[in-house]
Amino acid sequence: VFQEEDPLMAPNADHILDCQGQIYPAPILAAEKELGVMAAGKVLEVITTDANTRPDLRTWASKVGVEIVEITAADESGRYSFFVRKSAQVSARTDTAAATDESRLFLVVLKTGFEYTPIVRSAFMYAALAAAMEFETVVYCVQAGADTMVAGKIDALDESKPGKPTIRQRFSEALEMGVRVEVCEQTANVRGIAADDLVAGVELRGGAVLIDYASRAVGQLSF
């Protein structure tokens, strides 16, 4: 079990990411990307001020096969660092090895619309986290959730408060992590949404696709 140590005793890092001021899960997502271009055995330090990042670090690290070297105590301003070492197993991961995981599909179903913006943001936040933990992740939008993916509405109807992430920001984080975002074609037909109306990166898919995803997914969340 690792211990939280004084920042003065922190280990040396080969790479440093400054994520101060970034809201969870952005520091974890940034770490995931940086580790992807690092060599095995190298240590990454991530400097952050968001206490909400801390509880997920061990779970995330165990899923992606990296070692938590240390988490420092927070200073007076709330700043702390977490240090992770990229393992040889991660760098040696091949497509063949990944294929043995046959279905590492994680499904997020979004049916809530702009009537409750925080729920929509949460759907994309958890999807990004699932992708960071190396699940093949899909956000499938039905009912009012389909409206949130309309280009003319995603910004105009977002009720996020100042200082909070927007739906667009959470959506972009998810896309950057490789999450697929899809809208039910039958829902789109009923609500008068055409493929050209959707935000870039979102696709229309039939309802049977959702049934297939649900039958294969190792985990599901519904918002």
Image (tube, grey):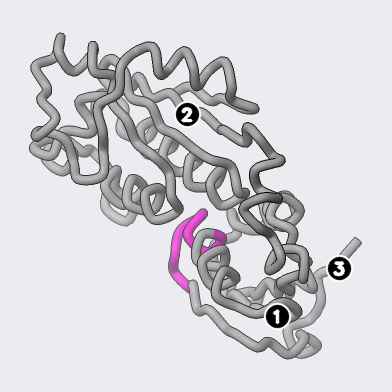
Q: At x 73% / y 83%, what residue is drawn? A: 7
Residue type marked 3: Gln
Q: Nearer the viewer, residue 97 or 158?
A: 97
Q: Is residue 55 visible?
A: no
Residue 43: percent from left, percent from top: 70, 80
**What residue is pinned by disc 2?**
108
**What residue is pinned by disc 3?**
3
Task: Tell me which numbered mark, 1 or 2, is placed earlier along the sequence.
Answer: 1
Contact (Cβ within 8 Å) of mark 1 with mark 2: no
Q: Nearer the viewer, residue 132 or 208?
A: 208
Q: Nearer the viewer, residue 115 or 68?
A: 68
| As drawn, 118 above or below 210 | below
Q: Secondary structure at mark 1?
A: strand
Residue type marked 2: Val
Q: Quadrant of the C terminus?
A: top left
Q: Secondary structure at mark 2?
A: strand
**What residue is pinned by disc 1?**
43
